[in-house]
Image (cartoon, helix red, strand yellow):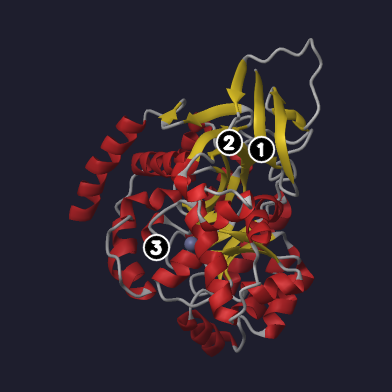
Amino acid sequence: MKILVKDADIFNGKEFIGNGLIAIEDGTIIHCGSGSLPDLWKPDEIIDGNRLLALPGLINCHTHAGMTFTRGYADDRPLMIWLNDYIWPLEARLTADDIYWGTMLGISEMLASGTTTFADMYFMMHRAAEAVKESGIRAVLSTGMIGLGSGVNEKLAQSVDFAVNWRGEADGRISTMLAPHAPYTCPPPFMKKVLDKAEKHQLPLHIHLAETRNEIEEIEKNYGKTPIEWANDLGVFNHPTLAAHCVHLSSEDMHILKEKGVGVAYNPQSNMKLASGTAPVAELSRLGVKVGFGTDGPGSNNSLDMFFEMKAGALLQKLAVNRAEVLPANEVLAMATSTGADILGLKDVGMLKKGMKADLILVDMDKPHFTPTFDPIAHMVYSGKGSDVSFTIVNGKILYEKGVFRTIDVEEVKQEVHIRAKRLIKG
Ligand SMILES: [Zn+2]
């Protein structure tokens, strides 16, 4: 399959190119920028890029897509009450089919708002993987593991089986990680077993760390250290690690993250909604820690729109440190694209250049809120929204075009989720 995007403005992840060409063949970008293509190269499909801006697809570094069932359910409550009294009881009733439909709804929302890759941590992930495979999106999947109670070893074995069996599937669009949920749900003996498996199977780790003040107090009380020190002392960071949140950090914690090359998923809207706090991203960025954006699950956001996340995340940092110049738009857009790919361990997405996988979006710039267009990059961060996305292309396939999904029957997906959500809430 050959696709040509012509006459589009391009932000390739580094620089802006006016009126360029993007040629895609068999899932890969074979040309991006100005210049021309060989006469013999004939595309199967041509996209007129006039008044469109091409960008690398957005990368959501931390979510729980199956939590679409909890969107709008039990809002405006503190984290532990929200989890203990509402979310965990509902999640205990989820079936494998629910996971499939809930994830497919999340994928629909992501594709329609310009996300081409997401990092997911949830349950019964083989069904989430099927939704990824069928829809055409790219994903880094992991089974969230709680290391307390009975059946812990079986759950770890299942999680490892999933990670080993599904990595590289769906034409290479699926990669996998191991996901111990958090320090307060995974005691050290369990963590040691997880790390042994990570070592044996060469799997990266995905974990929630330092999300709330409660967590800081609990880990300090039980272990006499911060969550980051706890993870570092256990050897977690000797493996490639994706650490979600990192809201409450000491300066020593930040140096550990930098020294160990830990990737941080910044989830500003979830952190604001649950009143968890403000991650010190401006300082992390100054130190050279790699930070990408995550939406967290649709229960605590309640949207999977990465445009909202970029804007909220940039504004929150400016307010937190009282300096308008921190986290400028180009840096924010890089966090949501190339840095996001980097911290997920994906080498061939996040930039638009020859040889990279063709994961890109085309944003409709012909809108009142993008006029005038002094700085299209700033527009993406401060004026844009998911609904401005006209085309979403993953692995060289057009998955979404102007409100139409090419791989998903979105009416069926919405109907399934409506019916299943009613059952889940009744108990
Ligand atoms: Zn999370």
Cα separation between marks 2 and 3: 32 Å
Q: Residue at x 53, y 58 (%)?
A: 382
The foreground one among 199 and 425 is 425
Q: Position of residue 359 (x, y in %)?
A: 64, 37
| Left or right side of 415 for 346 | right
Q: Amino acid at mark 3?
A: Ser
Q: Residue at x 29, y 58 (%)?
A: 72
Residue 9 bears which disc, if any? 1
Q: Amino acid at mark 2?
A: Leu
- Please give the residue where the numbered disc 3 appears in the rendered image: 300
Query: Disc 2, disc 1: CB below 8 Å?
Result: yes
- Please give the residue where the numbered disc 2 appears in the rendered image: 52
Cα separation between marks 1 and 3: 35 Å
Give the class, few, some or many, for how many residues have Cα within 10 Å of label 2's Cα (few <14, many ≥20).
Answer: many
Q: For mark 3, give the secondary structure.
A: helix
Residue 338 higher or lower than 151, as above or below: above
Q: Hey, which residue is sitting farthest top in the picture?
A: 40
Would you say the beta carbon of the disc 3 residue lies within 8 angstroms of ligand 1? yes
- Please state the total of marks drawn on the protein image: 3
